[in-house]
């Protein structure tokens, strides 16, 4: 596991020879692209900033869970884990 985190040549997140249909973004990129994205958004996830947004984040989580219940969606990743950070960044 540690090797995967430091050996970007062997364990790259880059797509293979197939066409790319979307931008990789922060989560699916390697340095230096990942570093650039991280610097861009790191203030949005600083502990002090997150603490100051606790009420807003709690409201967002409740809204996303309500949508999950209405749609009977049980995929926590798609319904909560993916949209929540994007919404937090957008409100920052």
Image (cartoon, helix red, strand yellow):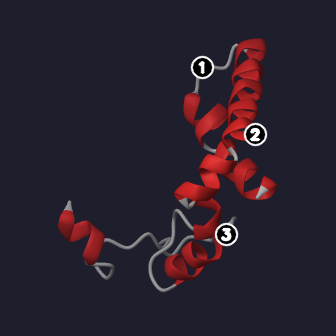
Nearest-to-viewer mark from 3 and 1: 1
Residue at horizontal 63%, vertical 44%? 82
Q: Residue at x 63, y 57 (%)?
A: 49
Residue on which disc 1 sits = 74
Q: Nearer the viewer, residue 3 or 56?
A: 56
| Disc assigned to residue 56 | 2
Image quadrant in which the C terminus is located: bottom right
Name the residue located 56 percent from the left edge and 36 percent from the top edge.
77
- Image coords of residue 88 (percent x, y): 71, 50
Q: Residue 47 carries which label?
A: none
The Cα–Cα distance between marks 2 and 1, rounded to whole angstroms, is 23 Å
Residue identified by numbered label 3: 23
Mark 2 burial class by Cα count in 10 Å: few <14, some 14-19, many 20+: some
Secondary structure under badge 1? loop
- Residue 87 can be seen in this image: yes
Q: What element carries label 2?
A: helix
- Does residue 85 appear left or right of residue 10 in this picture? right
How many other residues sit within 10 Å of disc 1, few (<14), some (14-19) or many (≥20)?
few
Whether residue 70 sits left or right of residue 32 in the image: it is right
Question: Callout 3: few (<14), some (14-19), or many (20+) C-alpha neighbours within 10 Å?
Answer: few
Q: Are dots 2 and 3 in contact, CB under 8 Å?
A: no
Residue 48 or residue 59, whichever sits in front: 48
Q: In this view, does 45 lie above or below 59?
A: below
């Amino acid at each position: 596991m540690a090797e995967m985190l430091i050996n970007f040549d062997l364990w790259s997140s880059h797509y293979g020879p197939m066409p790319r249909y979307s931008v990789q973004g922060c989560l699916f990129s390697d340095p230096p692209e990942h570093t650039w994205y991280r610097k861009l958004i790191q203030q949005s996830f600083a502990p002090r900033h997150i603490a100051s947004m606790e009420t807003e984040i709690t409201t967002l989580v409740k809204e996303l869970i309500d949508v999950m219940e209405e749609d009977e969606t049980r995929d926590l990743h798609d319904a909560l884990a993916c949209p929540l950070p994007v919404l937090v960044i957008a409100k920052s």
